[in-house]
């Protein structure tokens, strides 16, 4: 298989040959030939996006008693059209029974299918060990928010066949530090989120091994002390990665810009936080947690008000362009936050535009007008996973092979 396009990291026109699931050859098109073939109209080529926080799609939550392997597979396939080739299915706060069913269903599909196992490099367990305080817990059901329980977590990991890779929790509880140390000792990434923790408790969590702030700036109280709160120590802590939702609803543009400047693009990860209700028309919906509402502008909130978010409705392909719009990033830097940084956090073999790298690739266009709305994302032409076309069709330039060098 051959794909033509501009390499996202360098802007060079190139031909990429794929064989046996790997990038076999990258041939740069000579400048003379490039000019003759209207290079500016070629699509971009990038490694596929990796989204470490996806709650579901199309009316189906991962954290659900009715989750099946078929529903998990269907959600994965939808994401190819967004240019997302790998996700961490995110199971959110629920009863032990529901959590056990959800993680075991995902784990069973991964055991049965090598392909789906690669496309789901780990489960993200968001909760249930989070604050029960209003605002900071977001849409997580209060009745199921609870302190960390090591025996319960082990049971969940066993049910998941060892596939829980990220645990988002609050370090505000009495036994949090020791619990974090134990979880990190098993190789699971502990993230701080949906918290009422003090600055000292945040610092103690990082000392115990916490490595990530989950959707920093969200899952927060509407108001808190301007100096002594849980936001500043996470922004200041160089040992913490920060995941950010750049859908234009969760964080205002200036906040995205400031967060990226504070953490640097090297320590930021773009996530979508897509809700199970994403992909549906504007309206009110019942979810396993609470009634939610998708507003006409795409904002997804707990029904009955307009401020507490209940996940997102826009994919990370929109977030990539919003990082450029909001923070002034160039395309390679924005893509790094959606591809290389999550791969690095998870310890994955990087898909890349180098010979021998795994062939998880996307071809896409970007809007041509600078004033495009914040809900406009990458226009994906083709997605290739493990060397196979899973969405769209590869675009190839029409010229003879001797144009390559």
Image (cartoon, rainbow, N blue to C red):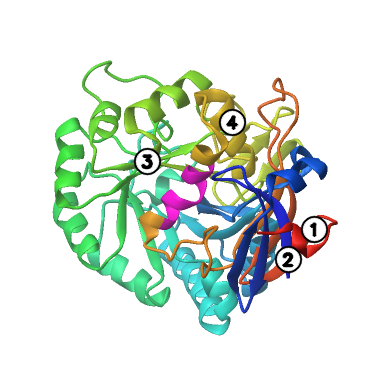
Query: What residue did someone put label 2 on?
Result: 2
Give the label, 3 or 4, closer to the camera.
3
Question: In front: 192, or 155?
Answer: 192
Residue 201 in view of the camera: yes
Residues at circles 1 and 3 in contact by the CB criterion of under 8 Å = no
Which quadrant of the figure contains the N terminus?
bottom right
Residues at circles 2 and 1 in contact by the CB criterion of under 8 Å = yes
Residue 33's x, y, as percent? 76, 48
Q: Of helix, strand and loop, which one carries label 4?
A: helix
Give the label, 2 or 4, closer to the camera.
2
Mark 3: few, some, or many residues within 10 Å (few <14, many ≥20)? Answer: some
Q: Of helix, strand and loop, which one carries label 2?
A: strand
Mark 3 and mark 4: Cα distance apart in space? 17 Å
Question: In front: 44, or 99?
Answer: 44
Mark 2: few, some, or many residues within 10 Å (few <14, many ≥20)? Answer: some
Mark 2 or 4, nearer chain start: 2
Say the numbered circle drawn on residue 322: 4
Q: Is residue 297 above or below residue 14?
A: above
Mark 2 and mark 1: Cα distance apart in space? 7 Å
The region drawn magenta spans 335-343
The residue sitting at the right extreme is 398
């Amino acid at each position: 298989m051959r794909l033509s396009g501009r390499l996202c990291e360098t802007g060079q026109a190139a031909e990429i040959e794929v064989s046996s699931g790997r990038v076999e050859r990258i041939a740069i098109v000579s400048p003379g030939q490039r000019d003759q073939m209207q290079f500016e109209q070629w699509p971009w080529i990038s490694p596929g996006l990796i989204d470490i926080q996806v709650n579901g799609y199309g009316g189906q939550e991962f954290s659900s008693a009715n989750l099946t392997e078929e529903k998990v597979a269907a959600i994965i396939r939808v994401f190819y059209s967004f240019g997302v080739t790998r996700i961490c299915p995110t199971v959110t706060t629920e009863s032990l029974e529901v959590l056990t069913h959800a993680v075991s269903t995902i784990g069973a599909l991964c055991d049965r299918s090598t392909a789906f196992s690669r496309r789901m490099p780990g489960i993200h367990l968001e909760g249930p060990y989070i604050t029960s305080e209003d605002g900071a817990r977001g849409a997580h059901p209060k009745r199921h928010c609870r302190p960390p329980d090591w025996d319960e977590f082990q049971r969940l990991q066993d049910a998941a066949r060892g596939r829980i890779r990220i645990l988002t929790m609050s370090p505000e509880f009495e036994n949090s530090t020791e619990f974090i140390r134990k979880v990190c000792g098993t190789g699971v990434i502990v993230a701080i989120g949906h918290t009422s923790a003090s600055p000292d408790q945040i610092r103690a969590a990082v000392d115990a091994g916490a490595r990530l702030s989950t959707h920093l700036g969200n899952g927060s109280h509407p108001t808190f002390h301007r100096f002594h709160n849980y936001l500043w120590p996470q922004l200041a802590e160089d040992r913490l990665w920060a995941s950010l939702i750049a859908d234009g609803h969760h964080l205002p543009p200036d906040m995205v810009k400031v967060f990226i400047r504070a953490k640097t693009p090297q320590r930021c990860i773009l996530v979508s936080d897509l809700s199970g209700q994403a992909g549906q028309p504007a309206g009110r919906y019942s979810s396993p947690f609470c009634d939610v509402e998708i507003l006409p502008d795409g904002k997804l909130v707990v029904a009955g008000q307009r401020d507490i978010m209940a996940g997102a409705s826009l994919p990370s392909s929109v977030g990539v362009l919003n990082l450029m719009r909001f923070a002034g990033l160039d395309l390679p830097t924005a893509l790094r936050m959606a591809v290389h940084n999550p791969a690095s956090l998870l310890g994955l073999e990087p898909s890349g535009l180098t010979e021998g790298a795994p062939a998880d690739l996307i071809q896409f266009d970007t809007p041509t007008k600078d004033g495009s709305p914040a809900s406009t994302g990458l226009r994906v032409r083709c997605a290739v996973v493990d060397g196979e076309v899973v969405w769209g069709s590869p675009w190839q330039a029409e010229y003879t092979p001797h144009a390559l060098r």
